[in-house]
Amino acid sequence: MENYFIYINIDGFAKYYFDLARKLNIPLYNLECLINEGCYFENLWTGIPSITFPMQSSILSGAYSNVTGNVSKYFDKEKNKIVYCKHLNYGETFGEVLRNKNNSLISIQQFVLNSRGASYEDRDFLYLQPGGDYKKRFNILLELLRNNRVDLGEKSIFYDKIPKFIFLYVDDLDEVGHNAIFNYEGLMAFSERKRISKVISRLQKIDIKIGEVIKALIDKKIYKRSYILITSDHGMVPFKGRSSIPRLIKDLKKCGFKNIIYTDDLVSKEYENNWDVVMTSTGIEVQVWFNSTEVDLNKIKHKLEKKDYIEKALTRDELIDKGVFEGFSDILVSPIPPYHFNGNISKRFLLRGGHDSLNEGTQRIFGVLKGPLIKENFICKDSVKNIDLIPTLCEILKIPVMRSSTGTIIRKVIKSKEID
């Protein structure tokens, strides 16, 4: 009998959202159903930087940026400029593995697979980018499951058999969590309690759609043969007020550095051969590079971590040990929420949410996996990386793992009598 695989990535799904919903007895019946019938990852972590494209590609390539090359942006010391990685991914994607093995797939806005295993033109390896919110994207999946049909607007595609591998990406929790003035849940929140409440409200609505997917699979008589993986790329933490960049510059000057430059682009000609420190930020944490190779990074790290606005600093070697591309940063500095290192130094932010942070709120993510060979009602308490998930599925489904994957097979969640 054929197995099916449905991967739903809910962008911005921090584990603490789920924990709080449970604590407050807010019903998420369908996520709880999958947990009861499968494995819940109590200790699932994302990578660095916890930014959407780097982490989405890491999950589907089974490797972090030491393989994919994508850290969102970094400073090129030779060119004296910030390099943006955009959709760079040197790793092989799960979609490419499936295509090479002629396993049909459909990707509903899982953009990592666009031209990397799926395309707009190929019905057997179809990529769709409908935009819109969770309803629009889930409804495409439901139409496929209920009627073997995908509506492309001017035409429709009908399948005798639906693709065995289905990928769905939704970004509602991320959008609401960022707390823009206007978002999917209406006007922005003005307190952290209300911001989280709006995110959980959106999560409840998504949970209902997950229930509809479960019912459609049951009606199609393939639920028991289906693997369902639901996880995320990162969580979210609050930030507000003015940037702490000026404080960091002041503290670095106390360490003896003079020409300290913040940039999102080029180092100006005035300083291109005469800078001591360059820094850049995606919004919360800040990447720092030093011109001199003689700088004692550990000494700087320990000095910074004593500051009342800094939670953690990681040196280049520590980042490399975590699978991060070696050019990402000499030191990565992450503040204590709600402090931030936003590059807009003059702006005083109202309450916002961000996820490029080393704080547990962004690093610890939700994850559940259900399927025929997955242990039932099992809580995996071991520390697991999000790059371990797809390689584990490859092992179970007897599909080659992605080339250069560094993910580990999570054998503890697999029914032992089935796989050694």
Image (spheres, rainbow, N blue to C red):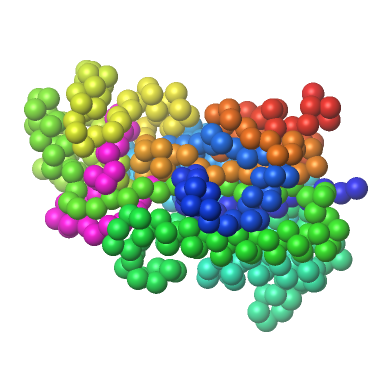
Question: Does the magenta portion include 149?
Answer: no
Q: Nearer the viewer, residue 194 or 164?
A: 194
Q: Examine the rendered structure and indicate whether residue 229 appears above or below residue 419.
A: below
**Residue at 64 percent of width and 56 percent of height:** 29
Quadrant placement of the C terminus: top right
Image coordinates of residue 295 in percent, x first then y, are 21, 20
Most extreme residue toward the right is 1
Give the left or right position of residue 193, taking residue 365 as reference. Answer: left
Give the left or right position of residue 323, taking residue 258 as reference. Answer: right
Q: Nearer the viewer, residue 269 or 36?
A: 36
Q: Quadrant of residue 211?
A: bottom right
**Residue at 70 percent of width and 55 percent of height:** 166
Give the left or right position of residue 162, taking residue 6 as reference. Answer: right
Q: Quadrant of residue 311?
A: top left
Q: Examine the rendered structure and indicate whether residue 303 appears above or below residue 340.
A: above
Q: Is residue 37 visible?
A: yes
Image coordinates of residue 11 in percent, x first then y, are 50, 53
Question: Does the magenta portion include 353?
Answer: yes
**Residue at 44 percent of width and 39 percent of height:** 363
| Start-end of magenta stretch | 329-355
Q: Nearer the viewer, residue 223 or 71?
A: 223
Q: Quadrant of residue 160?
A: bottom right
Image coordinates of residue 17 in percent, x first then y, are 47, 50
Q: Is residue 170 visible?
A: no
